[in-house]
């Protein structure tokens, strides 16, 4: 049974985005393996609080992600 874990910042994704991500990740797994695995493919989206995620020794938050998306 495949298990896909996705970590995002708290409130980074809307409910609709989460649902779409779950569906598309499940589609990706079944397209590579077997459609028979669809009903047993688990996707877990975990939300991380701002400042509890770091890259290169620096704590990051949702505002930092928004700057990246905006191309800043």
Image (spheres, rainbow, N blue to C red):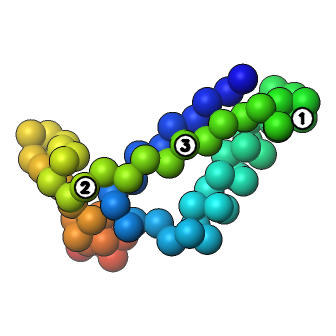
- The answer to whether 4 appears left or right of 61 in the picture is right
Residue 22 in percent (x, y) is at 65, 52
Q: Earlier in the sequence, mark 1 or mark 3?
A: 1
Disc 3 packing (10 Å; few <14; some 14–19; many ≥20): few
Screen quadrant of the C terminus:
bottom left
Q: Depth-wise, is mark 2 or mark 1 nearer the camera?
A: 2
Rendering quarter of residue 18: bottom right
Q: Where in the figure is residue 38, as x and y percent of width and height?
A: 82, 37
Frontmost residue, 58 versus 48: 48
Q: Which mark is residue 35?
A: 1
As helix, strand or loop, the secondary structure at mark 2 comes to loop
Residue contact between numbered discs 2 and 1, judged by CB atoms under 8 Å: no
Q: Relative to the observer, which residue lies in front, 8 or 65?
A: 8
From the viewer's perspective, is residue 10 above or below residue 5?
below
Count neighbours of disc 2 (C-alpha within 10 A) and say few if under 14, some if 14 to 19, many if 20 or more: few
Q: Secondary structure at mark 1?
A: helix
Where is mark 2, residue-wise?
Answer: 49
| Of the image marks 2 and 3, the number of the one nearer the N terminus | 3
Asked if the residue under mark 3 is in contact with the one under mark 1, i.e. CB atoms within 8 Å, the reply is no
Residue displayed at 90% across by 30% down: 36
- Check residue 57 in the rendering and tell me which mark sits there, or answer none: none
Q: Earlier in the sequence, mark 2 or mark 1?
A: 1
The answer to whether residue 31 of the structure is visible from this angle is: no
For label 1, count other residues whose C-alpha is less than 10 Å away and answer few (under 14), some (14-19) or many (20+): few
- Quarter location, residue 55: top left
Residue 6 coordinates in the image, percent (x, y): 48, 44
Regarding residue 41, the answer to whether it shows in the image is yes
Residue 62 at x, y percent in the picture: 27, 65
The Cα atoms of the two marked residues, 2 and 3, are separated by 16 Å
CA gap between label 2 and label 1 equals 35 Å
């Amino acid at each position: 049974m495949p298990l896909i874990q996705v970590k995002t910042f708290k409130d980074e994704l809307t409910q609709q985005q989460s649902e779409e991500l779950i569906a598309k990740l499940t589609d990706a797994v079944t397209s590579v393996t077997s459609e028979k695995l669809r009903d047993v493919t688990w996707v877990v989206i975990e939300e991380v609080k701002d400042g509890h995620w770091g890259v290169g020794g620096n704590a990051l938050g949702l505002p930092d992600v928004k700057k990246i998306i905006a191309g800043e």
